[in-house]
Amino acid sequence: MEEKRIFEVAAAAKAEGRDALTEVEGIALLDAMGIDRPGNHFIKSSAEVDGLKAFPGARVVVKVISPEILHKTEMGGVAIVGNEPGAIKAAIVDMESRFTKYRVHGYTVNEFVPFEPRLGYEIIIGYRFAKDFGPVVSFGPGGIYTEFLAKQFRPGAANVFFSPATADRDLVERVIMDNAVRTLLCGGLRGTKNALDEKILVDAIMAFIEAAPAFARAGVSEFEVNPFVVAKKADGTARLVALDALVKLDDIASGDIIQGDDDRLVNRGQALRPVDKIDRLLKPASAAVIGVSEKGMNNGRIILRNLIDNGFDKKRLYIVKAGSDEIDGCRCVPDVAGL
């Protein structure tokens, strides 16, 4: 990973007062992470088309590049055209006429990556900085299936989430084992071959996990690749290719974010939490329950019984209740001061 490059790209955009990267800048981050993506040429106008080196294949993808046009497909900023100068120039001329009100940096002519639009063959991997939690990396179904499948599957079967602070390769491999997308891609269904080597999938997820701390420090608030697609190489083996990158920036420091003892970014509240004392809460030496009914099974009595049933020592379990000496073998005291 080229961490320095991540900082350079984000800093340049921030210097212009922008809160998002263009796709060209997003591609630079993908390159810094070692993520596979289509080849592309960047040009400033239709006048530069004739000098481009041709990509292989019958088609190419033309995209408008503007910090003000993040969702290009919805706005007609993406065109799949024949791989010849006339068609490419016509597509760019059309965009030049339609996007006059936007700050357009230029256009990209991209290698067309053929893939099978089958269920599970498009995935999403993303990063987000949550100000109350820190960096989070997610993986799940991509393309047009993203929202639909997320609603249909049980939790964890479609989308999974990782904390870069705790996730390593072994954890990622174990967590995605039961994931529906991983099963469709790498698990192999009856009568079918695996579409993708699981190592390639884990490599892509790990690239985001390993880059997450650098993203956070660089002020990247969101980085989503949707979709990654499974495409075939010339030798017939599969590759996982990032077709689109959406990157947003934020002044993370404005959210009361500071650098923790281990160099991770955390919010000030997290830094002040007495984490070293958490065992006292989770494994208390003694406990007291208020509001226990002596006659009926109210909430307080249920809590008391649950503590006893889970092995809590009755000699270290107290009940705050005036007028009683003992309930369920636990000593009663008249008030909190009596503890």
Image (spheres, rainbow, N blue to C red):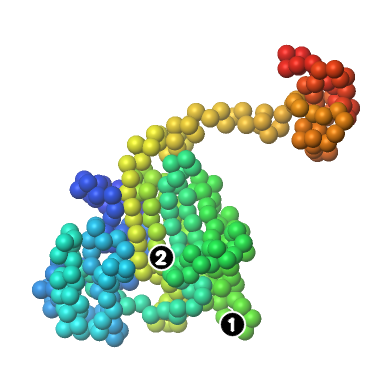
Q: Residue at x 73, y 17 (%)?
A: 336
Work out which quarter of the rendered image holds the N terminus and state it. bottom left
Where is residue 215? Give x, y as percent: 37, 48
Which residue is labeled 2 in the image?
Answer: 226
Query: What distance separates the C-alpha of mark 2 from that of mark 1?
Result: 25 Å
Q: Residues within 10 Å of mark 2 (few under 14, many from 20)?
A: many
Closer-to-camera residue (129/34): 129
Q: Residue at x 16, y 78 (%)?
A: 89
Where is residue 77? Give x, y as percent: 26, 70
Q: Nearer the viewer, mark 2 or mark 1?
A: 2
Which residue is labeled 1 in the image?
Answer: 192
Q: Residue at x 41, y 68 (%)?
A: 227
Closer-to-camera residue (191/97): 97
Closer-to-camera residue (172/44): 44
Q: Residue 324's mark? A: none
Q: Inspect the image, locate mark 1, and give the three-letter code of the amino acid beneath it.
A: Thr
In this view of the protein, can residue 309 be seen by the observer?
Answer: yes
Residue at the far left: name it.
47
Q: Is residue 117 above or below residue 318?
A: below
Is 324 left, or right, of 161 in this rendering? right
* Contact between labelled residues 1 and 2, with CB atoms less than 8 Å apart: no
Q: Is residue 188 above or below residue 261?
A: below
Work out which quarter of the rendered image holds the C terminus and state it. top right
